[in-house]
Amino acid sequence: MAAAEEDNTVKEPLDLIRLSLDERIYVKLRGDRELRGKLHAYDQHLNMVLGDVEESVTLVEIDDETYEEIVRVDKRTIPFLFVRGDGVILVSPPLRTS
């Protein structure tokens, strides 16, 4: 039982990622991109393989006449996605209630 308890403890940041394997996570990337998907694999560089991904890209444009900001969010779904770790800003595990 002690080995099972050790598997569920968070001692370093990557432990939180390990505990999120096969669960849906939120990933914020450079360039105003956000991903929500099931974490299939990762490494120490935060390269990740996600499945059933919803990508949101936020675009801010300036109207030529009124100079007002126009915010547009483009969304798409991707069956499998390899995420390069150097573009990752934030990784959020699923919300856990205990």
Image: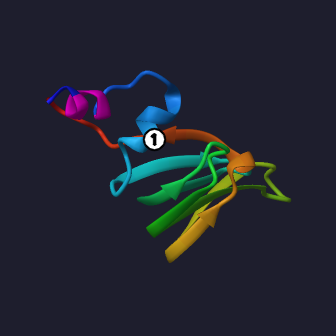
Residue 12 visible at all = yes
**Residue type marked 1:** Ile
Where residue 11 appears, as percent x and y from the top left, is: 43, 21
Q: Quadrant of residue 22?
A: bottom left
Q: Is residue 21 magenta?
A: no
Is 27 positioned to the left or the right of 86 in the image? left
Q: Residue at x 33, y 43 (%)?
A: 94
Q: How is the image coloured?
A: rainbow
Is 18 positioned to the left or the right of 68 in the image? left
- 83 relative to 8, above or below: below
Q: Quadrant of residue 36?
A: bottom left
Where residue 53 appears, as percent x and y from the top left, is: 47, 67
Where residue 90 appears, as percent x and y from the top left, is: 58, 38
Q: Residue at x 49, y 63 (%)?
A: 50
Q: Mostly what secondary structure, the magenta segment?
A: helix
The crowd level at tag 1 (other Cα within 10 Å; few <14, some 14-19, many 20+) is many
Q: Residue at x 51, y 74 (%)?
A: 80
Is 15 positioned to the left or the right of 33 in the image? left
84 or 7, nearer to the observer: 7
Q: Quadrant of residue 9?
A: top left
- 14 relative to 61, above or below: above
Residues in magenta, as a range: 3-7
66 or 89, nearer to the observer: 89
Where residue 72 appears, as percent x and y from the top left, is: 62, 60
77 or 6, nearer to the observer: 6
Q: Residue at x 68, y 55 (%)?
A: 70
In the rendered image, which residue does mark 1 sit on? 17
Residue 36 visible at all = no
Looking at the rendered image, the quarter that the C terminus falls into is top left
